[in-house]
Amino acid sequence: MVKDGYWFAAPPLLLGIIGVVLHWNWIGGALIFLGLFVGFFFRDPERTPPQDPAAIVSPADGRVMDVVEESFDGKAGRRISIFLSVFNVHVNRSPVAGRIASITYRTGKFYAAMRGRASAENEQNAFHLQTEHGEVVFTQIAGWIARRIVCWKSAGDSVIRGERVGMIRFGSRTDVWLPEPVEILVQPGRYVAGGTSVLARWK
């Protein structure tokens, strides 16, 4: 479990136990359930990325919402958007190996993360990764419930494919922008796992 999860899970668990001891069974049971769910939300399973050096992995667990042609800084490319429900693992991972050239945080709105406009208008944190194939941009996007983007890396850091880089608390979205040429291997509706599911391959 992510260490921050202990701070969120412990209070309701402790209060729930006290409630049960005092025979406030409904309240105590509800608080214990809440504490256990929070602990479940902050889980952080180990993941092993594929060996294929051309593979680009998912940065998060969730469902692929969009695969669209989209330019970035005048360069042609594709954007893959993934929606994370409160039941998904929310630890984010680097989709490729490279060096973090910059991290750009932008304030914004808190539309439901499954809505397409969330990519453009919601609060977000973008990692600009320099790779041997060109720039890759991975973005953590807050949703209607998620109001806290957590980043564990800094500009200048090197990352390996599948490495943990941060998390978003309670329901969110992640986007990956890939330059041409890439072969996209997923379609909208597919469920993916962060660090292991292959989204695309470098041609």
Image (tube, helix red, strand yellow):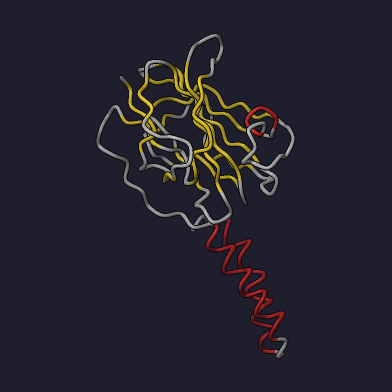
Please indicate whether residue 142 sits to the left or right of residue 152 in the image.
right
Q: Which of the 4 image quarters holds residue 187?
A: top left
96 or 192: nearer the eye?
192
| Residue found at the very far top of the displayed protein | 74
For the point 43% across and 25% down, the residue is 99
Task: Examine the rendered structure and indicate whether residue 85 appears above or below residue 123.
Answer: below
Residue at image position (46%, 54%) is 44
The percent coordinates of residue 170 (x first, y second) are 62, 51
Residue at image x 47%, y 46%? Answer: 61
140 to the left or right of 158: right
Q: Foreground: 27 or 62?
A: 62
Residue situated in front as seen by the camera: 3 or 132: 132
Picture quadrant of residue 4:
bottom right
Residue that appears at 61% across and 37% down: 141
Q: Quadrant of the C terminus?
A: top left
The location of residue 91, given as percent across then percent down, is 50, 47
Q: Is residue 80 above or below residue 171?
A: above
Q: Is residue 36 left or right of residue 199?
A: right
Q: Position of residue 97 (x, y in %)?
A: 37, 29
User: Exactly how many numbered labels are in the figure?
Assistant: 0
Q: Position of residue 15 (x, y in %)?
A: 69, 76
| Nearer the observer, 111 or 103 | 111
